[in-house]
Image (tube, rainbow, N blue to C red):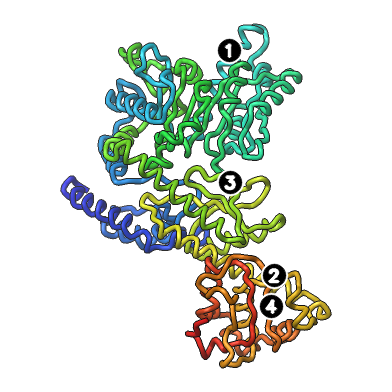
Amino acid sequence: MDSSEFRQRGREMVDYIAEYMESVGDRRVTPDVEPGYLRDLIPKKAPQEGEGWADIMSDVETKIMPGVTHWQHPRFHAYFPSGNSFPSILGDMLSDGIGAIGFSWAASPACTELETIVLDWLGQMVGLPADFLSFTENSKGGGVMQSSASECVLVCLLAARAQKIKELKALHPFVEEGVLLSKLIAYCSKEAHSCVEKAAMIAFTKLRILDPDADLSLRGATLAQAMEEDRAMGLVPFFVSATLGTTSCVSFDNLAEIGPIAKEAGTWLHVDAAYAGNAMICPEFKYLMKGIEYAMSFNTNPNKWLLTNFDCSTMWVRDRFKLTQAMVVDPLYLQHSHSDKAIDYRHWGIPLSRRFRALKLWFVIRNFGVAGLQNYIREHCRLAKCFEALVKEDDRFEVSNIVRMGLVCFRLKGNNNNELNQKLLSNINASGKLHMVPASVHGKFVIRFCVCAQDAKDSDIEYAWDVITDFATELLEAEIVKEKSGLPLDVLEHSNEEVGQVAHKVEISELMDLMERVHLPIQKQNSIASIGRQSSLGNIGRQHSLASIGKQQSLASIGEIGTNLPESGDQETANKPKQRPSLAKRLSKRQFSFTDTIEFVGMVNTAQDESMNP
């Protein structure tokens, strides 16, 4: 491909990306493929001769796209947002075009200096203390871009380990470093990201995982007690990882309590705010940063919630020399004459090679402005509160976290229904209509609903809730039928008067579905009788009461008729989902999901009268 064709293909690719992002909602959010699907579609060996670009792009649409999970889809509500925007894409395009490997200032001065400047910008936006910034007078601190929050946590733990071993070596000069290493212990909450545990494994250090409080926040007293117990065992605390915005439910550790204890113990306090840290650019969320002045390091991911494409994880340290002392390897071929005056980011992390990542973040901040980014975050938070309100309106569900930002954790109510909630999530995800993932909150299986799409709208939230409630209704109705099919006949055989007093509450939607399942005989002249005498169907009250079934049909007979399922000859028809009668469908919607007093004086053939109006 020469420059002339590149111009042509580049324009085509921009058009393809723009069209993809505009129409991604028309695709299925998750792929309907099995592991290994691509192996049969791609040749087993690389082509000996070059292929035409048109053929390559044709394969993208026919072979690659069918296996893509569309993270920018309006129905994608899993994990956290994957940052994406046109300015960011253009920044990566330019970075790739320049092709610089900025491991040191001398390798590409603009690459290093723009990163330093943009990290100071973002540090000020977030509200970090001045000594975390590079250009504060007499500051030892500064920021750097890493590939992920996992790398940020790892390099900070390694720096803390090196610093503590140095201190212990000064006190015990004749003790081997391996012995000193065996004494070190780090701390985090049970709600901390798994990368903390992985970092401790890589560093060969002990890690104690502590229980948070009822709000899933790690408290100072818990940390203090653990440190006291470990010191009594001869261990040396050296690192504490606190989280602002946990992965499972966006809970916040109490920095104001943890900070003084970590400082008194001489430990390195790292704050992982991969998702929620971006929201700190909004003044109304800065109260969650209380205690940040005790931290030695802090990270957040603009590639999660600041419209910047992966990879772009930003990290700041209070003392860059303590970080670089753990990382410096300085062969002659990497040295240059400006080392004493300039930052060399190769000493700030594990990789040597570094891309020009600062360009895309610089483009995003300049193009959106601080106000534009604040509005984007606030809109996601507003939409999450809208979803929370919908969950709370439905008595079948409960919210399982404190909703402060863009994540809502919810579940079907019940103490022993983890399996039911797991089934609900599995059914929804398998449909391809939505994509969500689970978490464990207080030992319960919950469903995480995260607002992810850049241009998410109220209609997206309403659509998602309609899908969730429709699947929940179907699942609960199936569970009810399954439960009742197992009851003995002597329990079912009650008079109609007794049925009205049974302690089981019958949902309107359950009753209507049961009617259509058993094909009850009908009398068209008697429609749905009366639903309360003081209100129409449109404004039925939300009080809970028992349903009274009419005098013409006993519950026992309903159960008997329910056993008359289609024979094998009608199996194909039986396997097809029934079309719900209009009334039953309306009653099963969110606004009618409550239990209401209802008296049936007759039953209508819904097949003959789809348009009946109560």
Q: Residue at x 68, y 47 (%)?
A: 443
Q: Residues within 10 Å of mark 2 (few under 14, many from 20)?
A: some
Mark whose residue sits in front, 2 or 3: 2
Residue type at mark 2 is Lys
Disc 1: which residue: 166
Task: Tell me if 611 is positioned left or right of 554 in this view.
Answer: left
Tally of numbered tags: 4
In three-dimensional space, the C-alpha distance between marks 4 and 3, rounded to whole angstroms, equals 37 Å
Residue type at mark 4 is Ser
Task: Tell me if 11 is positioned left or right of 440 in this view.
Answer: left
Q: Residue at x 61, y 74 (%)?
A: 508
In three-dimensional space, the C-alpha distance between marks 1 and 4, rounded to whole angstroms, equals 77 Å
Quadrant position of residue 541: bottom right
Where disc 2 sits, the SS reads loop
Mark whose residue sits in front, 4 or 2: 4
> Tag 4 or tag 1, which sits nearer the N-term?
1
> Tag 3 or tag 2, which sits nearer the N-term?
3
In three-dimensional space, the C-alpha distance between marks 4 and 2, rounded to whole angstroms, equals 10 Å
In three-dimensional space, the C-alpha distance between marks 2 and 1, rounded to whole angstroms, equals 68 Å
Q: Residue at x 73, y 85 (%)?
A: 554
**Which residue extends farthest right?**
490
Q: Are marks 2 and 3 in contact (CB under 8 Å)?
A: no
Disc 4: which residue: 548
Instruction: Examine the rendering and report whether any part of residue 43 can be seen.
Output: no
Mark whose residue sits in front, 4 or 3: 4
Disc 2: which residue: 505
Disc 3: which residue: 401
- Looking at the image, residue 497 lies above or below residue 70: below
Q: Position of residue 41 (x, y in %)?
A: 42, 61
Task: Tell me if 418 is positioned left or right of 369 in this view.
Answer: right
Q: Residues within 10 Å of mark 4 (few under 14, many from 20)?
A: many
